[in-house]
Amino acid sequence: MFDFLSKKFSNVLSWVKDKGRLTEQNIQEAVNQVKEALLEADVPYELIEDFLTKVKNEIIGQKVQTSLNPGQQLIKVVHDQLLEFLGGKSAIPLTNFQIPSVIMVMGLQGSGKTTTIAKLAKFISEQAKKRDKTRKILLASVDFYRPAAIDQLEILAKQVGVDFYRASSSDTVNAAKEIYEKFKSDHYEYLFLDTAGRLHIDNQMMEELINIDHKLAPKYKILVLDAMTGQESLKVARAFDQTVGFNTAILTKMDSDTRGGAAFAFRYSLKKPISFVGCGEKIDDLESFVPERMASRILGMGDILTLIEKAEENIDYQEQESISRRMMAGNFTLKDFADQLGMVDRLGSLQKIARYLPGMGEVSPDMMEKGQVEMKRFKAIISSMTEKERLMPGLLDASRKKRVASGSGVLVTDINQLLQKFEQSKQFVKMLKKGGRFGKFFK
Ligand SMILES: Nc1nc2c(ncn2[C@@H]2O[C@H](COP(=O)(O)OP(=O)(O)OP(=O)(O)O)[C@@H](O)[C@H]2O)c(=O)[nH]1
Ligand SMILES: [Mg+2]
């Protein structure tokens, strides 16, 4: 997400880090580079000018802070400004929908409405499950334009494990009313109403949505915007804002590395909240939108919080605890090491993880791939060892190494490399143990 923007910003910032003093000239140079990055990310020109004027005024007006070097100061100003426009520190993402509510989901064709509804239903169900609750959720669609649109929602509902209802009428407003009756009579807590999208904003589309809006008075109207469409998405958002209106936006396809400008442009000009971002095609690929994280991410500082959240969701807490207990007792074995590699697997590919880590932006995909291959090899080697060898790698003499090598189809040097990495990892973990929450993840 925001790969493109963040790469550009890291260039600017690493460049400015080297300079001893902020002068008018190097401020201007840095500002020009930020401008170029925003332009290439498809942020509308007038917004860029406005943003940069604010950044420049802020820098010039700032007192010299002795605690920061000039490069850091510039980073801080750009970061703070970015944060402000993304929603500020206080922006609370919409993660709690009131009960009961009708939630109407709107957007252009292919923006990701149907997929996002499934993601939201899953998100709400899981949030509830964490508190030992279940939510009664109904999904329904009034998209009669694309033949398979309603079937798609039905399939997704099944996948998520929530209810689906098909209206008998194929007139949009009548169908909406029928669906609403079902929602009421069966005492659902949430109704997600999928609507038809068009290739472009057109009056009929807006009329239809306005009609449904009047009849059902949905508590929430969510606009789904495709982040890949850059400047176009701002036009779409403005058009919806001026006609049907909406409460919040969800930006989809943030996993693509093309355009980072959409979120920025949307927040900057419409000042409405972005509640979630879609970051993949699967129904789990939904993240809360947190301005602070996003600003850091754009600046290439990584997003440790998001990574930790993912780790906490995907890794069995007890498994993690038991490894860390053994670590503490000095009993970290190769088996634990293999388990740890397994956890990394469950978190997603290394590439995906790297996006969240500071400074990793500059690691080439090539190196990442090598890392991935190495991880696989390590796992194969460890699985060819006996239980005893895994617990006491010291047992691995030349002949045992040979056996393991032929068992896992690698060379003896690969095994030595693994043992070396294992030792390093032990050291690394010792070091990180002191490092609070982030350290915990590596324990
Ligand atoms: N990579 C990626 N793909 C997504 C994301 N959200 C949706 N998609 C994909 O985008 C395509 C369109 O998604 P839909 O949910 O069908 O979009 P829609 O707005 O309902 O489309 P219409 O019903 O035709 O108007 C599908 O192939 C989805 O898998 C996302 O966050 N990331
Ligand atoms: Mg759809």
Image (cartoon, grey):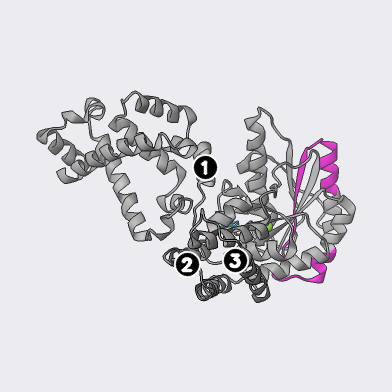
Of badges 1 and 3, nearer the viewer stands 3
How far apart marks 1 and 3 lie (CA) works out to: 36 Å
Q: Is residue 418 left or right of residue 322?
A: left
Looking at the image, which is closer to me, 212 or 433?
A: 433
SS state under label 1: helix
Residue that label 2 marks: 21
Q: Is residue 432 left or right of residue 225?
A: left
Task: Pick whichever of labels 3 and 2 is earlier in the sequence.
Answer: 2
Q: Quadrant of the C terminus?
A: top left
Residue that label 3 marks: 59
The kind of residue on which mark 2 rests is Arg
Picture quarter containing residue 42? Answer: bottom right
Q: Is residue 153 left or right of residue 384?
A: right
Residue at the right extreme, as displayed: 214
Residue that label 1 marks: 310
Label number found at residue 255:
none
Find ligand 1 in the image and state its quadrant: bottom right
Chain part drawn in magenta: 178-207
Mark 1 Cα shell of 10 Å, populated few (<14), some (14-19), many (≥20):
some
440 up-or-down from 55: above or below: above
The kind of residue on which mark 1 rests is Lys
Q: Magenta stretch containing residue 199, yes or no?
A: yes
The kind of residue on which mark 3 rests is Ile
Of badges 2 and 1, nearer the viewer stands 2
